[in-house]
Amino acid sequence: MGMSSQVRENMLRGSWVRRMFEEGILLKERHGDGNVFDLSLGNPVMEPPAGFRRELEKIVGQPQPGMHRYMSNAGYEETRAAVAAQLSRDTGLDFTAGDIVMTCGAAGGLNVVLKTILDPGDEVIVVAPYFVEFLNYIENHGGVARVVQAGGNFLPSLDKLEAVLGPKTKAVILNSPNNPTGVVYDDDLLHGMAGLVQRKEREYGTQVYLLSDEAYCRLIYDGLEFPVLLRHHLRSFIVRSHSKDLALPGERIGFVAVHPNCDDKQDVVDGLVFCNRILGFVNAPALMQNIVGHLQGVTVSIADYERRRDLLYNGLVGMGYSMVKPGGAFYVFPKIPIDDDVAFVRELQEHLVLVVPGSGFGTPGYFRASFCVDDSTIEGSFDGFRKIAQKYGLC
Ligand SMILES: Cc1ncc(COP(=O)(O)O)c(C=O)c1O
């Protein structure tokens, strides 16, 4: 077959979530939907908030001429102004519509940023455990991923970052709240990372961007604060999305924001707009732009997610599994009691519980389980988790 060998290799490297998805379908066909407990996906079962439906009905009931046409590749001015106003409230910085480019989700946004800033061979630092697509996106645009393992509690370690931050480093990707661990970086850590990057910029005479993937920034628990990276580094991009906070992953709507005081800001924004076009996204979906412009600051029920987080976390801890308590996102990332995370996941599968091995996130020895599922799926998984915990002497 004519598939590129590179694509073939990458498909094998990062296909754990997809593989579990496909195996889940087979298991559900064999055992019935209600008997398979699928915690492998980041595809929320929650419906969007009521405000989404109201906005959708409004626009369908009063269609405006031209509402399905192309618009500026950056997106509608009014939507970008609404996003900018919300970001200004969130960060205390002064964003305008000109700092925002609407994108096809965070995935589209990350690709647009990387395409804009990378020359062939430029390095991008990624902290493991990572969202596996980061590696694919970097490679899409000729970059080279430099992976560094996180330190304690899965937080980026400044010492480890320093060891890989070199003259070829063009960007560091941050992902907080993190997929797959759920950890939220605090302000001191962001300050330390920015300080390190600035020291290295001076040492090498380079410019290094911080690229903050904030796809889960509204899903934060226990009253934790979500710190503002942009207070610490001018050469920063925020990438956000409404896939999680408004439960709209299929609608492909998100945005990129550039630091309002970034050097060469207009150049950078022009580059983003151009790349949104030439990557074939052209513009973010028109209907969704019209809707989310009215829903900035609205979210799904955080209390509901927090309750599900507690249900899964307390259940697993009660059986003897150990993990960092997630402060955000909708995943737990427990340690496995044996050496081989893939074998562990296969064993769980025999009990009809689906999770993803840590290897799929660059960190073997763990597994990821999602709590963006119904309570019955979480509770139904406990029997399988308990049997394995008993087998390996956790309880
Ligand atoms: C860390 C992270 N970044 C980006 C994305 C992509 O999100 P979107 O649906 O907005 O493209 C995901 C999706 O799960 C994610 O987990």
Image (spheres, rainbow, N blue to C red):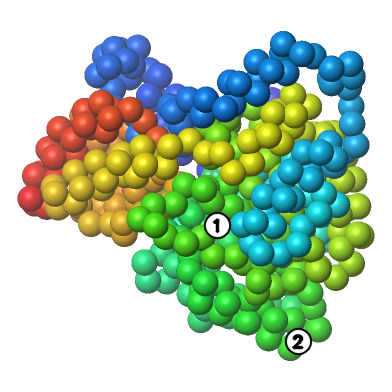
Q: Please name the residue shown 27% across and 46% down the image.
A: 310
State whether residue 56 is above or below residue 238. above
**Disc 1, ligand 1: is the CB inside 8 Å?**
yes
Can the viewer see residue 269 in this picture? yes
User: Quadrant location of ligand 1?
Assistant: top right
| Front residue (pair 104, 224) | 224
State whether residue 98 is above or below residue 170. above
Residue 273 appears at what percent x and percent y?
Answer: 87, 46
State whether residue 119 is above or below residue 305. below
Q: Please name the residue shown 72% across and 11% down the image.
A: 61
| Front residue (pair 379, 353) | 379
Quadrant of res 266: bottom right
Quadrant of res 26: top left
Residue 265 appears at what percent x and percent y?
Answer: 87, 63
Q: CA distance from mark 1 to mark 2?
A: 25 Å
Q: Which residue is mark 1?
A: 175
Residue 312 appears at what percent x and percent y?
Answer: 26, 42
Q: Is residue 246 left or right of residue 324?
A: right
Q: Which residue is mark 2?
A: 202
- Disc 1 crowd, CA 10 A, few/some/many (<14, 14-19, 20+): many
- Number of numbered labels in the structure image: 2
| Front residue (pair 97, 172) | 97
The residue under label 2 is which amino acid type? Arg
The residue under label 1 is which amino acid type? Asn
**Disc 2, ligand 1: is the CB inside 8 Å?**
no
Q: Residue furthest bottom?
A: 203
Q: Could you say which disc has been placed on residue 205 in the image?
A: none
Q: Is residue 114 left or right of residue 27?
A: right
